[in-house]
Image (cartoon, rainbow, N blue to C red):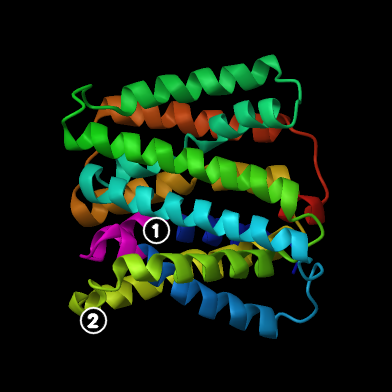
Amino acid sequence: MNERNALLAIHLGALLFGLSGIFGKLAETTPVVITFGRALFAVIALALFAQFAGRARGGAPVLRQIPLLLLGGLLLGGHWVLFFQAVKIGGVAIATLGFASFPAFTLLLEGLLFRERIHLREFVVVALVSLGLVLVTPDFDFASDATQGLIAAILSGLLFSLLSLLNRASTKGLDPVKVALWQNLCIVVCVLPLGWAVLPTVRAIDWLWIAMLGVLCTGLAHSLFVASLKVLKARTTAVIFALEPVYGIAFAWWLFSEEPSLRMLAGGTLIIAAIAFPARKTNAVKPAEAAS
């Protein structure tokens, strides 16, 4: 893959990740069932990718890493349930922007958990994200759907941040595709008992949207991300992935007439700028390090 194709791949990956909220809104079933189905179809897609992609980019997990991979699956599953709950009650735009706060959590938690110095620019990122979330919130009535949706989305971002830090500490040297495969398998096993009673009521069209979530927004998007890291610098991919909320909001506006207010657009701009800011300042890292 050359640089041009890698850039196309990472943009397509960001677009697919941005469509997660769209397919989640189209699927008229519970967040638990959506999470189960997404993980199930992702396992199939990732297993096929691992089978046909050729040589793995890392080793198999050792015994001590397996519990951490399973914990990562629980964090990922919880993140998805909260995110789709936010989509259902708050809308795609609020859910996407609330989740986009996760880099701010990562900066703070990384400094605390790994005892790394937090620089001034990282405090600026947290301040920008916080201000952006205040602007995104239509009102501060905790009984309103919009506020509850934003809270669920922010908690979703917190769990994803914890997942990112756990992966940093526990998946070094492992094939990133196999890491995702293990974590999605964990979700399937753990969430199935919670959604078993609802599964017979899910319509065929909803299974289609859930399959799109698992195959396109998880399996294919993750594979494109991993493949592009072989060519692109990690900071380049991070800046491009800052466009994920833009894609999600644009499609929600087009498909569901979820027209964002000027205040929401201003808040979203601050959040996206905050995501891109540290990525542009960070020194380049090796693709293999970024993937793990």
Q: Amino acid at mark 2?
A: Ala
Most foreground residue, 186 or 155: 186
Q: Which residues are magenta?
A: 18-34
The residue drawn where x is 58% and y is 17% is 124
Q: Is residue 20 left or right of residue 291?
A: left
Give whichever of discs 2 and 1 has the lower sequence position: 1
- Distance from Cα at disc 2 to Cα at disc 1: 20 Å
Q: Which residue is mark 2?
A: 204
123 vs 29: above or below: above
Label 2 crowd bin: few (<14), some (14–19), many (20+), radius 10 Å: few
Tag shown at residue 19: 1
Most foreground residue, 191 or 87: 191
Which quadrant is the N terminus positioned in? bottom right
Q: Looking at the magenta stretch, what is its main secondary structure?
A: helix
Q: Is residue 45 left or right of residue 265?
A: right
The residue drawn where x is 64% and y is 22% is 122
| Residue 215 shows in this picture | no
